[in-house]
Image (tube, rainbow, N blue to C red):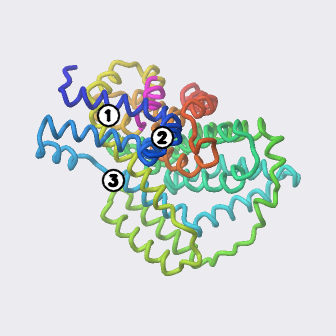
Amino acid sequence: MNPTTVQMIGATLFALAVIHTFSVAYFERLAHRYPAHAGAFHFLGEIEAVFGFWALVFVAFKFVITGKTATVEYLEGRNFTEPLFVFVVMVIAASKPVVELASFLVRGLTRLAPAQSRAKPMAFYFISLALVPLMGSFITEPAAMTLAALLLREHFFSKNISTRLKYATVGVLFVNVSIGGTLTAYAAPPVLMVATTWQWDTAFMMSNFGWRAALAVAINALSVTLIFGKQLRDVPYQATGGVRMTMPWSIILVSLAFLAIVVVFAHHEVVFIAIFCFFLGFASAYEKYQDKLILREALLVGFFLGGLVVLGAQQQWWLQPLLTTLSPDAAFFGAAVLTAVTDNAALTYLASLVPGLSDEFKYMVVAGAVTGGGLTVIANAPNPAGYAILKGSFDDNAIGAGGLFLAALPPTLVAAFCLWALR
């Protein structure tokens, strides 16, 4: 490896960005200590702003070292489709008609569950952590993360539940969404990065990843439900409401059509941005059927992922050679660990650039990448969306990086067992 000066700077700034993600609570404390500069410290304390900020620092360094033309060419050579797509799908999936439909379906399944009335909150909780993440294989992982996080925030996080339960819920949610999107070839970002190159279609994903991922999702959701069953039973069941739909079905169907078109054209930003503009007009025309759109939260998530795209491209010089030295088994665990400090989509993309990999190695890299996708906020593209929705329910308006890692570790081990040991 003979990295250039720019690559060395990119790797250093990437490491600083990772450290920054573990230190956002410190900046929030600085904001209270120095009110004159509270705005700047609050910005640096937003985990969604971390990679965007350090990407700006990198661009400034590159501009000084290589000049305007090379810097602009570098930025124009990056693919920002995924950040734009996550922004758009997050706003549409979090709109009131879509959320009400998801809640209606979960409530209906809860009502059908063979459980006593006092155990109904447990059933609702289990379905939210099991079924909705698996829906990510069809409506995309960012949409599933948004829906599950909104349901959990409304029905459980807004109630008087312990911080321990909140962390356990976020850990399972992040892991389940990461592995729950692998039943198809188009919904999980790390799968999207390799599907065309390696000729993986939905039939391949269903037969190789599908039942293993579904088993891990079910085990994780059931385990956390049973462990915290006493607390969950104390959540008033009336909070989940009845099963009557109050939203006009015409509004719901149009909103679903917007969501479906965006998902179908997920790789074509010109199309889905245009559809998004029509959606904004529709939401404005029928404002009485909408809550406030989560534009700010979604923009911050897009900013986070955009920064990851800019900085992540500078890690190829050390990450790709590292992957090629590993055996298939080592590739699984190496990918799971590296995902926690990079992005699993970036990791699998780099693997797709290596020629001559065995089929077993390819499976192991992707399986490891999705297994480790819940350990940190940066590990999987939809995680910042869940973080943005749920962070307000935690102390200091932030989900601690250490707490998230510890909470996500047990469901990650379950995912590793199902995707590695049962292969």
The tag on residue 34 is 2
Estimate the x, y position of residue 249 in percent, counting from the top left. 62, 77
Judge by depth and name the residue closer to the eye, 277 or 189: 277
The reply to whether callout 2 and callout 3 are in contact (CB within 8 Å) is no
Which residue is at a point 81% across and 61% down the rendered structure image?
Answer: 238
- Please report whichever mark, 2 or 3, sits nearer to the chain's N-terminal start: 2
Above or below residue 320? Residue 151 is: below
Which residue is at a point 60% across and 32% down the rendered structure image?
Answer: 403
Which residue is at a point 30% across and 64% down the rendered structure image?
Answer: 270
Q: Which residues are magenta?
A: 334-344
Q: Main secondary structure of the magenta part?
A: helix
Q: Which residue position holds label 3?
A: 81
Judge by depth and name the residue closer to the eye, 335 or 94: 94
The tag on residue 35 is none
Above or below residue 233? Residue 268 is: below
- Please report whichever mark, 3 or 1, sits nearer to the chain's N-terminal start: 3
Left or right: 87 as drawn, with respect to 242: left
- Tell which tag, 1 or 2, sits nearer the viewer: 2
Q: Given the image, on which type of amino acid does mark 2 rest? A: Tyr
Q: Quadrant of the N terminus?
A: top left
* Quadrant assignment, res 416: top right
Q: Given the image, on which type of amino acid does mark 1 rest? A: Leu
Residue at mark 2 to residue at mark 3: CA–CA distance: 38 Å
Q: Is residue 93 visible?
A: yes
Q: Across the whole image, how many numbered discs are drawn on residues?
A: 3
Q: Would you call the spot at circle 1 few (<14 residues within 10 Å), some (14-19), or many (20 or more)?
A: many
Residue at mark 3 to residue at mark 1: CA–CA distance: 17 Å
Name the secondary structure under disc 2.
Answer: loop
Estimate the x, y position of residue 143 in percent, counting from the top left. 52, 55
Estimate the x, y position of residue 47 in percent, counting from the top left. 47, 42
Q: Which residue position holds label 1?
A: 350
